Image: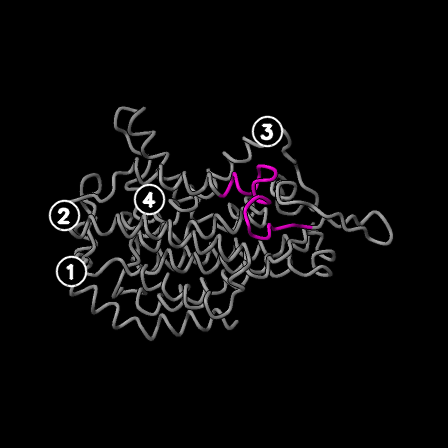
Amino acid sequence: MLAALTALVVTIFLGPRCIKKLYELKTGQSIRVEDCPMLAQLHEKKKNTPSMGGVLILFSIFIAMMLWMDLSNVFTMIFLLTIFWLGGIGAYDDYLKLKYKNSKGLNSRKKLLAQIAFAAVIGVYGMVPDVAEKIQVTAPTAKEQIQSIKPVVAVQLSTSEYMTKYYIPFFKDPVVQLTGGLTILGIFITIFVITGSSNAVNLTDGLDGLAAGCVVLVAGVLALVAFFSNNLEMSRYLNILYIDGAGEIAVFLSATMGACLGFLWYNGYPAQVFMGDTGSLALGGILGVAAVLLRREVLLALVGGVFVAETLSVILQVASYKLRDKKRIFLCAPLHHHFEYKGWPETKVVLRFWIVGLLLAVIGAVSLKIQ
């Protein structure tokens, strides 16, 4: 609660100063017109709205981290690396768009490779035996509580043992555990989840308040999982994995929620500032990293269904355009622009996507008990 309140207050307090500075730097929003020319008309008023507001979000999260998290905890270090690495990629991308007129920013291939490199580091650290133990930081551990034995037996798991277990909502036992050479598959899954999540939030960030609102909902569910995962009795009661130190993940996600809520104060329609790639790439990465550390990758796909739908709409649109002689499935992709083209007001699109996100978040939260 304190982390969320801190990030919220810092964001709201520094918002006007940050927006003023971004206006001075002329970080105006670029409007895509190549394949969706109607966007230029729909979003004409947004072209001078400053971007790079993600700097404000990440700074607020950082302040909350410094005040309320255990700085010696490995999860704190991982998330600190996340906001600097992915936030740095996004900031450099936004900087190139600002410095060079008509620039599309950082080359998409280079951006993707940088994201993959980060996700690979997380995957190797967590899944390759002894890697975590060799680094001079206390490696995360977990306990699997066997309910069928009375009294309940808690089996200690090393980092690589718990990080190679995969769980799905509504089922208490892991559906699979990767061992031996299959660990490589686990690393690829981690890369897919973190990179995919980072880019999914980036694609969703196209309407006032849409991405920030959806991030709040997803982060809230994952924070709940992290909170219960750090309590031996609650994790036993809910039949979920006990993860030592997962409370730090809950604190960080709460700070993320607070920062995004504070950002919505200025990003709600009509937006005074946009988060840009600086915010969207980092926020998506935060959700992906949290899901991986909590072993809740499938839960992330469920509660983040809006992000999944937005990403799939782009993939299907591109595939259809290339394979079906330039025929499109949607009027415009990502999906939120398709509904804009159909005549839905922007505020209605955002509100309905939030409602869908809230329903998915409730289902995800309920899955913790029904398993």
**Residue visible at 38% across and 69% down in the picture:** 262
Give the CA separation, mark 4 to mark 1. 26 Å
* Type of the residue with mark 3: Leu
- SS type, badge 2: loop
* Type of the residue with mark 1: Lys
User: Which circle's residue, 1 or 3, is located before the other in the chain?
Assistant: 1
**Residue visible at 52% across and 38% down in the picture:** 124
In the orientation shown, which residue stands out farthest toward the right? 150
Q: Position of residue 140 (x, y in %)?
A: 61, 51
User: Which circle's residue, 4 or 1, is located before the other in the chain?
Assistant: 1
- Please indicate whether residue 89 sits to the left or right of residue 251 in the image: left
Q: Which residues are magenta?
A: 122-142
Give the CA separation, mark 1 to mark 3. 49 Å
* Type of the residue with mark 4: Pro
* Type of the residue with mark 2: Tyr
Which mark, residue 182?
Answer: 3
**Residue visible at 36% across and 35% down in the picture:** 315
Q: Is residue 136 magenta?
A: yes
Neighbourhood count class around disc 2 (C-alpha, 10 Å): few under 14, some 14–19, many 20 upward: few
Give the CA separation, mark 4 to mark 2. 25 Å
- Please indicate whether residue 152 sits to the left or right of residue 66 in the image: right
Looking at the image, is mark 1 or mark 3 nearer the viewer?
A: 3
* Residue where numbered disc 1 is placed: 26
Neighbourhood count class around disc 1 (C-alpha, 10 Å): few under 14, some 14–19, many 20 upward: some
* Residue where numbered disc 2 is placed: 100
- Residue 36 location, quadrant: top left
